[in-house]
Amino acid sequence: MLNDMEVEKVSRRLRRIQGQVGGIEKMVQDHRYCIDVLQQIAAARAALYQVGMVMLESHSQSCVVDAIQKGHEKEAIDELMSVYKALHK
């Protein structure tokens, strides 16, 4: 679970990503050079990936640890690996 400082950090990143996506839409509407658009898409994807990694780290340090302490190791690890694989598609 994210603490208050992490929530603010993630929220700031997500607002920045929203701006990036809006900029990409404007680039498409303005018929900008495809490579420029693709570079911005790559940047937005990388930013979203970083948000995902912050969330994954927080989840691992709180929810996964809690589940393991309660004897739910297999379920916690299975869930964690499933999400990890989804982030790396």
Image: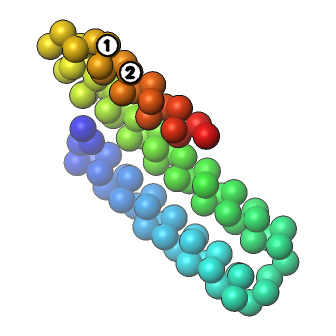
Q: Is residue 28 left or right of residue 63?
A: right
At x 76% / y 65%, what residue is drawn?
38
Task: State the image coordinates of residue 68 (x, y, percent, origin top left).
Answer: 24, 13
Q: Quadrant of the N terminus?
A: top left
Instruction: Report the front residue among 74 and 65.
Output: 74
Name the outermost residue toward the left: 70
* Image vertical order of residue 32 relative to residue 73, above or below: below
Q: Is residue 59 left or right of residue 54?
A: left
Q: Is residue 61 left or right of residue 48?
A: left
Q: Which residue is mark 2?
A: 78
Asked which quadrant contains residue 78, the reply is top left
Query: Which color scheme does this rendered protein use?
Result: rainbow
* Image vertical order of residue 63 relative to residue 69, above or below: below
Name the outermost residue toward the bottom: 30
Cβ–Cβ below 8 Å for labels 2 and 1? Answer: yes
At x 44% / y 34%, what residue is drawn?
83
Are there few (<14), some (14-19), or many (20+) residues within 10 Å of tag 1?
Answer: few
Q: CA distance from mark 2 to mark 1?
A: 6 Å
As shown in the figure, which amino acid type bears the numbered disc 2? Asp
At x 70% / y 65%, what residue is drawn?
40
